[in-house]
């Protein structure tokens, strides 16, 4: 009898959740363990269910949260000034009541950004397949789960059947080795990778991250990498779960307990790519050569080390790429040859599902302690969840931020995207710990520079983009 072929971690997830093959082109009917629902992408899905007279097949597998449109003012109230957002929130509450889905609304002590609260509540576990109406569902790969974003029609199908029509992806292994220099963090790793392979470099692939650098990272840092993998076009990102993941999950509210934990752990320890498993593509990154990264353009791959200068489009032979760069520089109000660390900012924002966990806030607080935000900068911190906010206050981080002149706000997506009260004006320039720097992402005509939370904190203090290595603090 022939031995089974070695499989990748991605193959193991898909094979264990495949209901049946649908054709010979790689389409399968895929069982989904759990789904996270928000107020922004779910209304049409629920309306479709109502119109068709369908129910939600397994409501206990869903968790709903308000995070995209809610205000993040320092004092939290349920009322919303924006009528459209208020309607989305109230319709989500109605749908959750009618269909039996648990809702963490804005006044719930567990409220927060979906990709922050799902892991912190233990709703995401190794080996699961999870889908949600948000592209950054890839975050959950840091826990050894497979998460991916879906559209509204797919949300409706998932709620009704607990399955999705799914096409298998190709596999890409990204091996990151080497020790990160002082001042460098996970955000720099994933931004460097996106810069290396491009914003579409992983389109059609699921990425598995491995290597000594990944092993050394905390679970929260790994979430940052998996979260932003989608900015390289990946529709899935993985890291094999290890003892750090198991320790992170052990006492989470929804994690298995007692004998069930022991049984689950025995299964989770087998969640890794088999020796000899073949990947469709391989990419290597030497973390020891990296420098702190910032974006200069309007795509996450338009990035460079903070010590560099704005690139010259005329040095690029590819006409399409050159035109993209020229458009980006016009929008950003930059000129080729400018030193990146000379770029003056008007705003600094620390938040989002990428970088608003407690470790991110600790990094920023170490930079900010005893200093003051530049007089011309408005600096804002929005924790990723109410629990993160409470923990930061208990640790004294909130006081450090407010003493320095930062606004300390409630949890939500906030200024990651212009879908709530926290919107930049045309011409504003923001150092941001978020995941996307598209035109208008933080407000029409607003300009976004992506970087790590510590780099945002340093920029807020100095009033311009700043190399954290020369700031005098190690994040």
Image: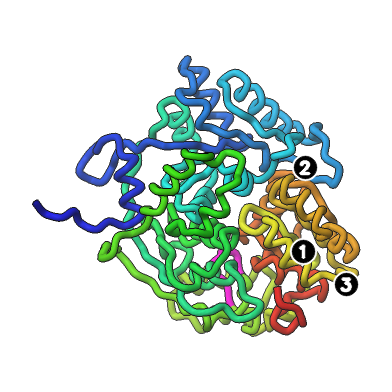
Give the residue drawn at x 65%, y 45%: 113
Name the residue that disc number 1 marks. Answer: 348
Q: Is 40 a magenta residue?
A: no
| Residue in front for this viewpoint, 169 or 427 | 169
Q: Nearer the viewer, mark 2 or mark 3?
A: 3
Q: Hey, which residue is sitting farthest top in the picture?
A: 53
Q: Residue 247: percent from the left, percent from the top?
A: 55, 54
Secondary structure character of the magenta stretch overall: loop
Looking at marks 2 and 1 on the same chain, the residue that comes earlier in the sequence is marked by: 2
- Report crowding for label 3: few under 14, some 14 to 19, many 20 or more residues within 10 A (C-alpha): few
Against 163, is 201 above or below? below
Name the residue that disc number 3 marks. Answer: 370
Q: State the SS at label 3.
A: loop
Q: How is the image coloured?
A: rainbow
Give the residue drawn at x 54%, y 56%: 227
Picture quadrant of residue 369: bottom right
State left or right for residue 21 relative to residue 157.
left
Looking at marks 3 and 1 on the same chain, the residue that comes earlier in the sequence is marked by: 1
Give me the C-alpha separation between circle 3 and circle 1.
18 Å
Asked if residue 296 shows in the view, the reply is no
Name the residue that disc number 2 marks. Answer: 71
State left or right for residue 263 relative to residue 227.
left
Against 30, is 400 above or below? below
Q: Quarter holding the C terminus?
A: bottom right
Looking at marks 2 and 3 on the same chain, the residue that comes earlier in the sequence is marked by: 2
Q: State the extent of the magenta-drawn residues as a range.
A: 296-304
Q: Residue 166: percent from the left, percent from the top?
A: 35, 41
Question: Which mark is drawn over residue 268?
Answer: none
């Amino acid at each position: 009898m022939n031995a089974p072929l070695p499989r990748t971690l991605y193959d193991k997830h898909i094979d264990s959740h495949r209901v049946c093959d649908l054709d010979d082109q790689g389409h399968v009917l895929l069982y989904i363990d759990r789904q996270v629902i928000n107020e922004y992408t779910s209304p049409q899905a629920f309306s479709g269910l109502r119109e068709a007279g369908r129910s939600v097949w397994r409501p206990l597998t869903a968790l709903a949260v308000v995070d995209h449109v809610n205000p993040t003012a320092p004092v939290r109230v349920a009322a919303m000034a924006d009528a459209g957002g208020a309607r989305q929130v109230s319709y989500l509450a109605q749908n959750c009541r009618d269909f039996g889905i648990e809702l963490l609304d804005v006044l719930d002590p567990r409220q927060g950004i979906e990709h922050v609260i799902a892991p912190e509540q233990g709703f995401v576990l190794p080996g699961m397949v999870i889908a949600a109406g948000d592209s950054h569902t890839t975050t959950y790969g840091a826990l050894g789960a497979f998460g991916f974003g879906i559209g509204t029609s797919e949300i409706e199908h998932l709620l009704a059947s607990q399955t999705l029509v799914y096409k298998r992806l190709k596999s890409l292994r990204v091996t990151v080795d080497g020790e990160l220099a002082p001042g460098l963090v996970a955000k720099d790793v994933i931004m460097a990778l996106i810069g290396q392979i491009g914003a579409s470099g992983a389109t059609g692939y699921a990425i598995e991250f491995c290597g000594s650098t990944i092993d050394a990272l905390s679970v929260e840092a790994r979430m940052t990498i998996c979260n932003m993998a989608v900015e390289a076009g990946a529709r899935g990102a993985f890291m094999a779960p290890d003892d750090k993941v198991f320790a992170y999950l052990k006492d989470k509210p929804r994690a298995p307990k007692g004998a069930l934990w022991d049984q689950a752990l025995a299964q989770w320890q087998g969640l890794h790519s088999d020796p000899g498993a073949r990947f469709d593509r391989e990419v290597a990154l030497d973390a020891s050569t990296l420098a702190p990264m910032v974006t200069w353009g309007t795509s996450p791959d338009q990035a460079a080390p903070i010590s560099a200068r704005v690139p010259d489009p005329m040095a690029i032979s590819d006409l399409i790429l050159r035109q993209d760069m020229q458009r980006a520089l016009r929008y950003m109000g930059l000129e080729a040859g400018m030193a990146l660390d000379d770029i003056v900012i008007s705003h600094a924002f620390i938040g989002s599902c990428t970088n608003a966990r407690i470790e991110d806030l600790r990094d920023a607080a170490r930079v900010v302690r005893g200093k003051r935000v530049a007089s011309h900068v408005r600096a804002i911190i929005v924790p990723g969840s109410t629990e993160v906010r409470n923990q930061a206050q208990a640790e004294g981080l909130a006081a450090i931020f407010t003493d320095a002149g930062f606004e300390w706000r409630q949890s939500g997506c906030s200024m990651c995207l212009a879908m709530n009260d926290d919107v930049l004006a045309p011409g504003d320039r923001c150092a941001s710990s978020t995941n996307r720097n598209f035109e208008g992402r933080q407000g029409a005509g607003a300009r976004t520079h992506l970087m790590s939370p510590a780099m945002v904190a340093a920029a807020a203090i100095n009033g311009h983009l700043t190399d954290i290595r020369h700031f005098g603090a190690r994040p």
